[in-house]
Image (tube, rainbow, N blue to C red):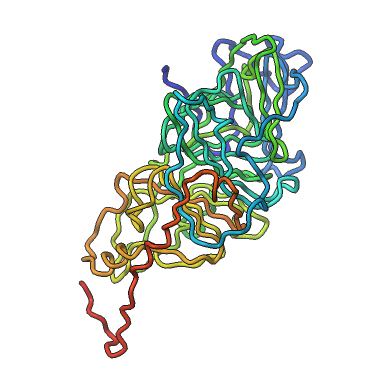
Amino acid sequence: MAELKYISGFGNECASEDPRCPGSLPEGQNNPQVCPYNLYAEQLSGSAFTCPRSTNKRSWLYRILPSVSHKPFESIDQGHVTHNWDEVDPEPNQLRWKPFEIPKASQKKVDFVSGLHTLCGAGDIRSNNGLAIHIFLCNTSMGDRCFYNSDGDFLIVPQKGKLLIYTEFGKMLVQPNEICVIQRGMRFSIDVFEETRGYILEVYGIHFELPDLGPIGANGLASPRDFLIPVAWYEDRQVPGGYTVINKYQGKLFAAKQDVSPFNVVAWHGNYTPYKYNLENFMVINSVAFDHADPSIFTVLTAKSLHPGVAIADFVIFPPRWGVADKTFRPPYYHRNCMSEFMGLIRGHYEAKQGGFLPGGGSLHSTMTPHGPDANCFEKASKAKLAPERVADGTMAFMFESSLSLAVTKWGLKTSGCLDKDYYKCWEPLKSHFSPNSWNPTEPN
């Protein structure tokens, strides 16, 4: 596979043209009477026209045929994609899933779209407020099929297998320990090379942005320059009546046929693009004296609500780092949260639960549901010598955190067959260490 090229920078105003057609970007205007190379001009708007300049998102695409050139959309089988948050009763318990099973290619061919499974979510698509968490399980490439989402942005976290993603803006290769965001309305197709699995955070009607840094200052966490945008690449390919465009609209799937590849954009400019990010580039901030800083210091991207400081969704990671806090129980503390916390594991193990929480699985701790280290972790950490130590080497866990109360789907609770019904048992061995006659317990250090 030839090395792919990218443009660097988060949210930048960028311009790109396929080198096979030099000068394909119009000069001095967006919509000339006749575009260079007799291309069509098409604007893709990711925000209202009248949004403030700082939040206005749009790109101009110069393409061989406009995207309107297709047959009518018709409803297709939904598979396991849903936005019905009332199909089963609410489930307040701590939930954990074993690794979600990938269909064997020898038994059934499943591509990215047919392998989408909605796990949980909340909110309302039609009012542009809410989110969904999906699992994708696939074993074959999409071929002459592409997908676009009219409902929201997809933040894609591959866990097993790399993704070669064709977009209208160019191509991206996204591997485990990288993420990508395909924003609302952007058409894409995915090639896979083996049985492949990952997680998706979908947000309705808003976009991901870098979190504010506040007292941290100008630098830290995810650096804007480490986000990569594909460069223009086109194919002028005829597929008479045989290319399928799949659209997710108001939570339902629809398909339309067309005669050409949708990846026929010769040049583009704007600030509304797909992008990728390597999680290894995250600059970790942590306590260097005592106690914990809140896990918000590990936020890579956020999708803000209308309430200051409250997110519809945060994407948070727990990367390799040093633990040096003195007089401190270092693993994550016991906790009840007004937010919902879904956790996944890309590789390795998670420090607070070394058994049972496995790569390709997940957990959900809902609003005000208590959670924290298992009994074994508590006992070990309470007696550990507090020397500087490396934490989470060779691992990468992440969290989708939301201010919304998430409902789990029927697939998540029943059909998947991956729910770990013994999860609660990891806390059963916890015992009382209360010492009413000794105010100062024996300190291990």
Q: Residue at x 76, y 13 (%)?
A: 34
- Of residue 184 and residue 326, the one placed in the foreground of this image is 184
Q: Quadrant of the N terminus?
A: top left
- Of residue 341 and residue 99, the one placed in the foreground of this image is 99
Residue 159 drawn above or below residue 140: below
State whether residue 226 appears in this view. no
Residue 304 drawn above or below residue 276: below
Q: Quadrant of the C terminus?
A: bottom left
Residue 382 drawn above or below residue 224: below
Residue 155, image x and y in percent? 55, 40
Q: Residue at x 26, y 65 (%)?
A: 380
Q: Is residue 101 left or right of residue 437?
A: right
State whether residue 143 appears in this view. yes
Q: Residue at x 45, y 64 (%)?
A: 371
Q: Is residue 341 left or right of residue 429?
A: right
Residue 324, image x and y in percent? 28, 61
Q: Is residue 443 left or right of residue 188?
A: left
Image quadrant in which you'd find residue 168: top right
Query: Which residue is at the far bottom?
Result: 437
